[in-house]
Image (spheres, coloured by chain):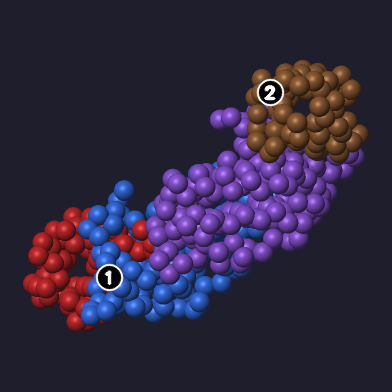
Chain colours: A blue, B purple, C brown, D red
Amino acid sequence: MTIEKIHVEISELKLDQSIAKNFVSSNSHGACTIFEGVTRDHSDNRKVKFLEYECYKPMAIKKLKQICEEIIEKWDVKVSILHRIGKLEIGEVSLIVATGSPHRKEGIQACEYSVDRIKEIVPIWKKEFFEGGSIWIEDENGFRPFS
Amino acid sequence: MTIEKIHVEISELKLDQSIAKNFVSSNSHGACTIFEGVTRDHSDNRKVKFLEYECYKPMAIKKLKQICEEIIEKWDVKVSILHRIGKLEIGEVSLIVATGSPHRKEGIQACEYSVDRIKEIVPIWKKEFFEGGSIWIEDENGFRPFS
Amino acid sequence: MEIEVLFFASYREKAGVKSCTFEISHGSNLKGLIDKIVQKFPKLHSDPSKIVAAINEEFSDQSQILSEGDIVALIPPVSGGSK
Amino acid sequence: MEIEVLFFASYREKAGVKSCTFEISHGSNLKGLIDKIVQKFPKLHSDPSKIVAAINEEFSDQSQILSEGDIVALIPPVSGGSK
């Protein structure tokens, strides 16, 4: 059963929202919520040129699936998560989370939950290339695998 | 200033998500949140055949703009709301709300707020056509214009 | 003075009209107009005090005084979008 | 026994390798392995007890005992997606 309600993908290619949206759509759903994370042109006061995402793929897939399982236990939704890795230009989409649900509240909540949770337990790292240098975006408090 | 951060539209034509998304996008945004309300094939225990939306257009536009103004006062976002009226088949999109924001929290919150608020103050009505009849979907508690 | 009244959705169907012009005296408030409307279209609501209305596209309390040229819309309860 | 260790992102750059095989004695725990890793690559972390690691793709406490064939990955802190 579970297998039909969740979908995850990690890809070096441009993300296609319609894949996520089609997966979560159903004639019994009244709501579709989509979150897209986009590469910004600045970070703190740095002017960002582009980003690179790196992942520990088998574990990242496993953790994305775990998040989806958590979600479908909490809410009556279908969920699809697409994460891009590799080099991303400004304005490109790094993350798409889509939920489809009979009612809107649960879809929006599930979407928000997943985005928060991805930061907590999914081993994907972001390197920022800006004027004059590059830096791995690391937050000592950002990773809370046991929470 | 305000004028560039909000966009509303009521249309008899199929809604086009890219219009909302393009409006709210910006190189300084890290998040885009999109909510779509979709025509479900059932309501309570009725099997729905199609829906019809009717609106008091000048007032509905005014109230949608008011909601957008409320939103940009509360959160650092751009917001676009598209609402369809007329006859909608099952699976068709009646409402699109898109927010674009530097950070994800505010975009998701703004999106959720707008969907709640639309039900409260925007004069758009839905008539459900099901096997054996039709009914205006009215909820005595659904309209709270002074809240 | 004359006031134009707009009917939507279930009210439009119950009244059988989209709009209708009512004659009221100067100084009348929205409540007075609504009572007149319900007298003409009794099916609209069993309790006229519960009807929500807008004057010139703004929700208005029934105590509000009407002016020449005002457009009044009766606003049935809504449950729009998805739940 | 031999344990394969994977390095990612900033750890990969600091270690200068993507993976490396370490020889540890039977019964060693993750902490013992991490201490060995940091001895070899001191730039990795000033406080090895704070390094987060996964054994076979699951986050694991440093007290966990390692087994033959385990794959250990050092997981730098992340701040993925948009804030």
Whether residue C7 is situated above or below residue B61 in the rendered picture: above
The image shows residue B59 at horizontal and vertical percentages of 69, 43
Q: Residue at horizontal 89%, vertical 36%?
A: C17
Q: Chain of mark 2?
A: C
The image shows residue C35 at horizontal and vertical percentages of 80, 19
Local crowd size for mark 1, using a 10 Å CA cut-off: few (<14), some (14–19), many (≥20): some
**Residue identified by numbered label 2:** C65
Local crowd size for mark 2, using a 10 Å CA cut-off: few (<14), some (14–19), many (≥20): some
Q: Residue at horizontal 77%, vertical 47%?
A: B53
Left or right, residue A37 beside residue A129: right
Is any atom of residue B138 visible in this view? no
Q: Secondary structure at mark 2?
A: loop
How far apart, in angstroms, are the residues tagged by discs 2 and 1?
58 Å
**Residue identified by numbered label 1:** A46
Q: Secondary structure at mark 1?
A: strand
Q: Residue at horizontal 84%, vertical 44%?
A: B129
Left or right, residue A32 beside residue A127: right
Task: Compare residues C26 and B62 and report the one nearer the observer.
Answer: C26
Whether residue A88 is situated above or below residue B87 in the rendered picture: below
Residue type, numbered disc 2: Ile
Residue type, numbered disc 1: Arg
- Do badges 2 and 1 share one subunit? no
Q: Residue at horizontal 13%, vertical 58%?
A: D49
Residue B133's quadrant in the figure? Answer: top right
Say whether marks 2 and 1 touch (CB < 8 Å).
no
Whether residue B9 is situated above or below residue C57 in the rendered picture: below
Residue D21's quadrant in the figure? Answer: bottom left
Task: Compare residues B112 and B81 and report the one nearer the observer.
Answer: B81
